Image: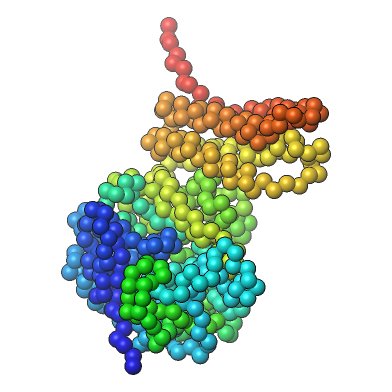
Amino acid sequence: MELANMDLTQEKWLPVLLFSGARKKVSLPELLDDDIADVDYPRADFQGAAWQMLIGLLQCAVAPASGDDWEERWNSGIDPGAWAQGLRALAPALQFGEQKPAFLQSFEPLDSESGPIAGLLIDAPGGNTLKLNKDHFVKRGGVERICPHCAVMALFAVQTNSPAGGAGYRVGMRGGGPLTTLVVPRQEDAFPLWKKLWLNVLVQEEAPSPAHYPLIFPWLAPTKTSEKPGNIVTEENAHPLQAYWGMPRRIEIDFARTQAGQCDLCGEPHPRLLSDMRSKNYGVQYDGWLHPFSPYRQALKDSAAPWLALKGQPGGLSYKDWLGLMLEADDRFNKILPATVVRQLYRDSVEVPVGLWCFAWDMDNAKARCWYQHRIPLARVAHDEAFTDVLKLILPLASEALSILRSAFKSAWFEYPKEAKADFSMLDIAFWQETERDFRTLLEALIAEPRTTSADTRRALRDWERALHRYLLHAFDRDVLTNVDCPADILLRQINARRMLEGTYIKSKTRNALLALALEKKETTHV
């Protein structure tokens, strides 16, 4: 016998953390409670997914019609009646269970074989990994039964981050493992959750009507499968709000086989734990979307090239990536476009110090290698040429310094360095991580006053350059000059490499241009 679906607009299914430190579950209408500090999931990727889902709900239910409307709700709050009414309108799309249509599940029954519910988790070992007994780091059997409340967010997370999974298993709207950048207050504990989410809600002149819902929520209509070439979903043949509700995977959770017990994810008891699911290839294939939460890149040499969402990378983000996340910028190969929510923020008049919460899975096709997340300060100086001009010296100098350090290591380690091959990935990661603190100090000074007419800004530039110089010598000494019994000829080679390191860095044109910018301005006296 089919059981009634769980209505996500009424069920107390969302785990939250209160400012008091208490934890509880709330329904969506209760989201506007000023006592709620954050969502409270046991997995970092679920935290990120929950923010994206809740922002999407706010966008669909109570989006502001103008910048003034946005600011009014920021200052005075979202009307609880309007929020409840908006949720009631969305209720047909927010039913989770066995009866179709069901939230983020295939509209049609799937005739494929059942598999473990752990298949909803991005980092769970896949079928081939299990077959070859390669689940060394993430073991099988860790997650066998989950409660429906966790299953909701697991579904959303896998659809949002959907990686490559074999023939016909479509990646998410932004590709597998997309980088998400959400705007957050710098003092996050000073604002309730709804207000933090509101920073990422976009102005939307026209509210969606129920007639639009099948084009926004793809599980409300027969799946637009992609067996045949060309059956692609774009912003032109869908609705722009489907960006928040992409469904590349055809998934059907088995609600017929449940049992009571404790959820393997949240640890809470539930009478109907889920253990099985079905999936099938050739789900929705997306193309040409600019998702509001992700930065994008386009090849500089081809203005007709597609915009591609940035992805998670080994080692995570480093501050060399920050400029493109904040402002439109170019690197040697690509034009970088910040996320829409970041670009909108520059048009808002709310004077709150903000930063970016950046997160992503680092994926190797279907294999999740690591989850990375970062908090970075956001400079609201989008059109300030002084700020960008200074950063265009700082970041290239850091990259050049790293290149000089690599060359010095090769000269110290190898008799014929030009012919030698070495893996410097760990050196690169260490460099960006270990010099980030000094860069953050400099960035704070530039955000406060980007013009080099300020004595404090010039001093911050000089301090940062000196810290970079010291780091190069320290890193070389730490990792090369370590053997007290080093043979004389090798020691001489290492000392010469160190001299080359310092000499090349001091002669750098980028360094000298930066120091010229940071020179103390001497006052002239008139006789």
Where 107 falls versus 143 (above or below)?
Answer: below
Most extreme residue toward the top is: 527
Which residue is depicted at the point 75% across and 29% down? Answer: 485
Most extreme residue toward the bottom is: 1
Asked if one can make out residue 345 in the rendered structure from this viewpoint, the answer is: yes
- Residue 245: x and y in percent read 41, 72
- Residue 71: x and y in percent read 25, 55
Which residue is depicted at the point 36% across and 67% down? Answer: 267
- Residue 43: x and y in percent read 42, 62
Q: How many marks?
A: 0
Most extreme residue toward the front is: 261
Asked if one can make out residue 59 in the rendered structure from this viewpoint, the answer is: no
Give the color scheme: rainbow, by chain, secondary structure or one colour. rainbow
**Residue 303 located left or right of residue 110:** right
- Residue 402: x and y in percent read 63, 39
**Residue 473 located left or right of residue 5:** right
Where 186 falls versus 390 (above or below)?
Answer: below
Name which quarter of the figure residue 207 lies in: bottom left
Where 501 falls versus 94 (above or below)?
Answer: above
Name which quarter of the figure residue 449 lies in: top left
Q: In which quarter of the image is the N terminus?
A: bottom left
Which residue is depicted at the point 50% across and 58% down? Answer: 371
Q: Quadrant of the C terminus?
A: top left
Which residue is depicted at the point 51% across and 27% down? Answer: 462
Q: 210 or 370: nearer the eye?
A: 370
Q: 46 or 104: nearer the eye?
A: 46
Q: 457 or 149: nearer the eye?
A: 149
**Residue 225 located left or right of residue 499:** left
